[in-house]
Image (cartoon, rainbow, N blue to C red):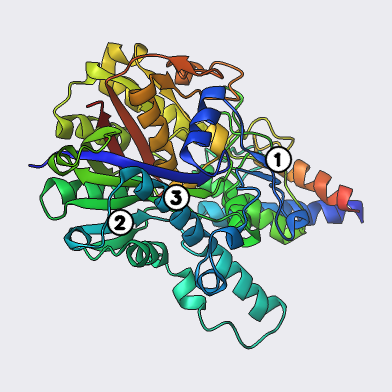
Amino acid sequence: MKRVVITGAGTINALAHDVPGTLEAFREGRCGISDLDIRDKDRLSIQIGGQVHNWDPEAHFNRQQIVLYDKFTQFTLLAAREAVTQSGLNFDGHLGYETGVVLGTAGGGVNTWDENYRAVYEEGKNRVHPFVVPKLMNNAAASHLSMEFNLKGPSFSVATACASSNHAMGMAFHMIRSGMVQAMLTGGSESMLCFGGIKAWEGLRVMSKDACRPFSLNRNGMVQGEGAAVFVFEEYEHAKQRGAEILAEVAGFAMTSDAADIVMPSKQGAARAISGALRDARISGDKVGYINAHGTGTAANDKTECAAVADVFGPHADRLMISSTKSMHGHLIGGTGAVELLACIMALRDGVIAPTIGYEEPDPECALDVVPNTAREARVDVVLSNAFAFGGLNAVLALRRL
Amino acid sequence: MGSSMTGSVKEKVIAIIAEQAVLDPSDVKMDSTLESLGIDSLGLVESIFAIEEAFDISVPFNANEPTQSDFDISSVAAIVRAVEGLVAQKG
C-alpha cells in the first residue's frame, strides 16, 4: 500500500480568505460568527452565522466564469488555487491523467436554487438563466477544479450532510493508497447562508440565536457557516522525490453507519468510526494527542461525542485534547471537515492546539479537556478529525506528523 | 366566549398530540407527559410546528434546552396553558 501525504492547503471561511489568516484566528481564538448580511433577514429567527464577509468574486473571476460559478464553486476555486500553489504541482503533463478531484458538499449551489425559486415563485417569472442547472449541481465545483487545473483522473462529489468533506478526503486517501492515482485535490465547500438555506435549518429548532458554545453546559445549538477548504493529497514517494514540503501524513480513515435514527447521533456508531480510523492507521489510541471534534454545540452531539471518545480511549481520554473550531467558523455542513482539517495540520506542524471558544460552564457529560477559550502549545504526533452526519453517517480521519 | 375559546385550544392541542402519538384523543389525558405518550424529541418538534400552524403563533422553543424555554412542556395541561397564553398575546 502507498502512503499518502498532504502537500498543499487552501481555504476561505468566516475567519479569513486564506490558510495563514485562518491559522492566526485559531491561535488567537477569534470568533468569525457575526450578524448575517443576507436578503430577507428580517423574516428569519436566526440572525447570526459564520458568513464570509468582503467577498468580491470580480476580484478573482471574469464575467463568463461568474455566470457559471455558484458561490460554493467560487469558494472551492479560491481555496484550490492556494492549495495547488503551495504544493508546487503542475498537472499539465502526465500527472494530470493520474490526478482527480473528490469534494464534499451537502447542498451544492443552494444560493442558485434560492435565487431562481425566488424568480419563478415570488416574482412570477417564467424564465430562468440558461446555466441554472450547471451552476447548482453538486459536482459543479469538482468539475470546475478539474478544468482549471487539467485534472483528468477520477473525479466526483460526495454528499453525506455534515460528514461530506471527511468522506471525500477519505475517498481521496483510499484512491492514492491503492495506487489508483498519484494525487488528488480534495476537501469540501458549502454556501448555504441564504434565506432558504437558513429557514430550512430553523425548522429543526437546533440553532443557537447567540453563539456556538460546544461542550459548554449552557450551549444552545449550532451556528451555520460557509466557505471551503481544499487540500492536495499526494503519494508519499512522489512528494519525496520532488522535494515537496509535507504538511502531514494521512494515516488512516474509517466510516460507519449508525443504522438507527435520521438525526439523533449514536455513541456506538461514532466510537466504531474513531476506533476504526486508529485500526486502519495501525496506531494505538494512547498515541493520539488531539481530536478535532465534530462539536456542533447541540445538546445531543456534544455529549454523545464525548461518551464515544471516553469509550474508545478509556483512561487516555482524560489526557488527550479535543476542541471544536466550529465555535469560531461555524458549522460549514458539507465543507466543515475540510476547514477543520486545518486545525489538525496546525496541531501537528506548529504544535498549537486550536481552542473551543465561547466555553462558559463545564458540562459533566462533556468532561474532557476541550481546550477552553485559549489556544495551547503542545507537541502532538497523531491527531483525529471527527465528522458525524445527520443520517447516522460517520467519517473519521487520522493524521500523523511525518 | 372565554371558556369556549379555551375549550377549542384544549381540543386542538390534544388532537395534535394524539395524532403525533398515534393515539385516540380520548387516551390523551391532561396530566399525561409527552414521554408517557411515547413522543420523543423529534415528535415534540413536529408537534410544536403543528401547534404554530394551527394557531398562527410562534412558540419559543429550542430543542437543545427544552426545559429552559418559556414554553412549558411538562404535561399536556402545561402545553395547553402555554398555547392559551400565546394565543391571548396575539390578541
**Do dots 1 and 3 share one subunit?**
no
> Considering depth in this image, is B17 or A301 the residue closer to the camera?
A301
Callout 2–callout 1 Cβ contact below 8 Å: no
Mark closest to the chain's N terminus, 2 or 3: 3
Q: Give, as a three-letter code, the residue at label 2.
A: Val
Measuring from the top left, give residue A223's x and y in whole percent: 59, 41
> Considering depth in this image, is A114 or A54 the residue closer to the camera?
A54
Mark carried by residue A79: 3
Q: Give, as a three-letter code, the residue at label 1.
A: Ala
Q: Residues within 10 Å of mark 1 (few under 14, many from 20)?
A: some
- Horizontal arrangement in the rendering, residue A231 relative to residue A62 (left or right): left
Cα–Cα gap, marks 2 and 3: 14 Å
Measuring from the top left, give residue A284's x and y in whole percent: 18, 21
| Image mark 1: chain | B
Quadrant of the drawing holding the N terminus of chain A? top left
Q: Give, as a three-letter code, the residue at label 3.
A: Ala
Viewer-nearest of discs 2 and 3: 3
> Above or below — where is A100 with respect to A384?
below
Measuring from the top left, give residue A261's x and y in whole percent: 38, 47
Quadrant of the drawing holding the C terminus of chain A? top left
For mark 2, what is the residue? Answer: A102
> Considering depth in this image, is A80 or A368 the residue closer to the camera?
A80
| Image mark 3: chain | A
Cα–Cα gap, marks 2 and 1: 53 Å
- Horizontal arrangement in the rendering, residue B35 relative to residue A380 (left or right): right
> Above or below — where is A3 with respect to A176?
above
- Mark 3 falls on what kind of element? helix
